[in-house]
Amino acid sequence: MIKFAGLGRFAAATVILSGIALGSVAQAQEASPEQLKAARAAIDAIGATTQFDNILPGLAERLKADLIQDSPNYQDQITAEVDKQALALASRRADLEKEAALTYAKAFSVEELNAIAAFYSSPVGQKLLKDGPIASRETVKAADIWAQGISRDLQKQTSVELSKVIKVTPAPAVDPAAAAAPKAAAPKPAAKQ
């Protein structure tokens, strides 16, 4: 369930960022302090940057694993030094937050940012962040089932109607699920002796 909550924030951020690409953007060269404040509130409400929380810890763990693989006798020293350096770099996370706020401030007006923050801070907005990915996944499943039925019916009805013109027996309707199933390999002939 925790994974889905993260996906909800990611989905919300994606929806908002897609608005940028579609032109509903209030471009500005410089963001005012008011815009930056509203942008930070919107980012916090949708959790737009929480998906990046594990970047530094993940990089540190990978570096530790690589270094320990090269020098296994120094595992304790490697772990201590990588952790020390990672902690020293942790303050740079604020740079990412500033860039995200600037991006949102340039993309949205103060009013839009306040509306985003208000919605995603509300119980309904929080529910959308939490349950939206689950609803999306179920919708995709329903669309797949619907598409299989439509495909089957399209093929069947087209074959029936074309058989009236072409005067050929219609091809049997193929079950899309059966067509997608892997086919068994033909048996190999026995080796000659």
Image (cartoon, rainbow, N blue to C red):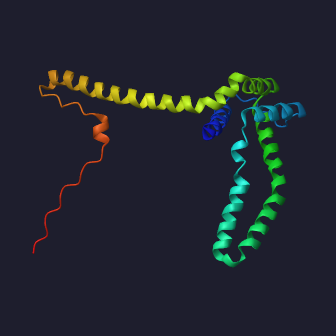
Q: Can residue 22 be seen in this view?
A: no
Q: Give me the residue at 34% from left, 26% from top.
A: 150
Whole-percent x, y for residue 96 in the image: 78, 47
Left or right of 8? Residue 86 is: right
Q: Residue 57 falls in which quadrant of the image?
A: bottom right
Q: Residue at coordinates 29% horizontally, 24% vertically from top-left?
A: 153
Q: Residue furthest left?
A: 193
Above or below 53: residue 2: above
Name which residue lies at 80% across and 38% down. Answer: 101
- Residue 81 picture location, percent across and down: 79, 68
Q: Where is residue 162 in the image (x, y as percent from the top left)?
A: 19, 24
Q: Would residue 160 be found to the left or right of residue 32 on screen?
A: left
Examine the rendering and report whether any part of residue 36 can be seen.
yes
Quadrant of res 102: top right
Quadrant the N terminus occupies: top right
Residue at figure coordinates x 29%, y 28% from the top left = 152
